[in-house]
């Protein structure tokens, strides 16, 4: 419960001290996954933006982004095909800035999951359809069964309908179900739409190490170039020629025409481009839009921007519960 400004100040200090000592490029044969100068600068730009230091944020992000659509000084470039971002094994590609590595060689198992040896990507099993099986002769993809979490809402389905990124983002299993090609269990808040970016196929199931469903090897992007393009456009106030070029580059990559740059256009593009990648909640909260966008989920302004402190963490301490809990 320290003053957030003090925490942010320390983060800034750490990053500014680290940047000169980090390499500009890596030997991916034996250094893949390490942070580079570009990664730390991108993170610093995001830290500035979250504090409302837009001028500083735009400056840092511009250094990382370079000319929109071209290869930046740090070697970053948008992939030609959006769908290639989700190919298992397409690791440390030109669009990746900070990437979390996973392996199918972990010895993790359920009885010590989370105890330091769970190096597989557990998001995969979380988003897989519950009780999924294909019927005889089915043309549906051969997905591995999972827990059915992180379900695609009808609102996101509608927003992405007709967008070129739809097919790489959303899998409509309800249509296969209605055609009798698959069977599955309806999970909580079931819509029939699933997060395809991270849905595992049976071909991805590990045959070695610990529990197979804790051993998926798909990497996770923490920051990628399309994200930083849109962050810089936002830091620029959602206006001007460069902000327009940054927004255009993200849309042009998937064959979409230019639209006038505004804050609404940038945040909408973030919703569509980064769907399911863990940014939406923070975007809504930091821009003050959460109470409206999440009204049907019971979001209360002044309360749900932060989590409650668990009772076990409060007992026998001087900590006070967060407001309105």
Image: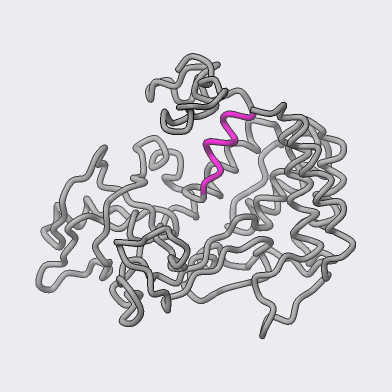
- Vertical comparison of 143 with 226: above or below: below
Residue 244 appears in the rendering: no
| Residue positioned 55% across, 62% down in the render | 82
* Image location of residue 4, percent across then percent down: 71, 29
| Number of marks in the rendered image | 0
* Residue 4 within the segment the image draws in magenta: no
Magenta segment, which residues?
Answer: 278-286
* Residue 284 within the segment the image draws in magenta: yes
Residue 315 appears in the rendering: yes
Q: Main secondary structure of the magenta part?
A: helix
Assign the C terminus to one quadrant of the image.
top left
- Viewer-proximal residue among 164 and 109: 109
| Residue positioned 67% across, 83% down in the render | 30
Point out the residue furthest to the front here: 316
- Viewer-proximal residue among 94 and 57: 57
* Image location of residue 268, percent across then percent down: 57, 37
Quadrant of the rendered image containing residue 157: top left
| Residue positioned 81% across, 34% down in the render | 54
* Image location of residue 2, percent across then percent down: 69, 28
- Vertical comparison of 145 with 153: above or below: below
């Amino acid at each position: 419960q320290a003053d957030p400004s003090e925490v942010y100040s320390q983060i800034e200090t750490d990053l500014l001290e680290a940047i000169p000592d980090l390499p500009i490029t890596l030997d991916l044969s034996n250094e893949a996954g390490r942070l580079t100068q570009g990664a730390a600068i991108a993170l610093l730009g995001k830290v500035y933006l979250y504090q409302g230091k837009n001028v500083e944020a735009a400056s840092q992000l511009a250094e990382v982004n370079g000319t929109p659509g071209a290869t930046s000084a740090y070697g970053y470039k948008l992939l030609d095909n959006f769908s290639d971002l989700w190919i298992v094994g397409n690791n440390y590609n030109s669009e990746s800035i900070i990437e979390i590595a996973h392996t199918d060689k972990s010895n993790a198992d359920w009885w010590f999951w989370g105890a330091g040896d769970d190096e597989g990507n557990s998001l995969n099993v979380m988003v897989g359809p519950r009780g999924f099986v294909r019927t005889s002769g089915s043309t549906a993809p051969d997905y591995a069964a999972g827990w059915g979490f992180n379900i695609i809402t009808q609102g996101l389905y509608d927003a992405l309908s007709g967008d070129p990124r739809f097919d790489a983002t959303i899998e409509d299993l309800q249509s296969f179900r209605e055609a009798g090609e698959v069977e599955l269990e309806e999970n909580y808040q079931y819509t029939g739409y699933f997060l395809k970016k991270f849905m595992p196929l049976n071909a991805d199931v590990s045959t070695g190490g610990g529990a197979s469903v804790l051993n998926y090897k798909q990497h996770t992007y923490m920051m990628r170039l399309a994200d930083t393009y849109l962050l810089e456009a936002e830091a620029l106030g959602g206006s001007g020629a460069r902000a327009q070029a940054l927004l255009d580059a993200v849309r042009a990559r998937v064959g979409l025409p230019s639209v006038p740059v505004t804050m609404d256009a940038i945040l909408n593009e973030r919703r569509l481009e980064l769907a399911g990648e863990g940014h939406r909640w923070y975007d809504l909260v930091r821009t003050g839009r959460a109470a409206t966008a999440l009204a049907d989920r019971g979001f209360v302004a002044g309360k749900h921007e932060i989590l409650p402190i668990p009772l076990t963490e409060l007992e026998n301490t001087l900590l006070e519960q967060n407001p309105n809990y």
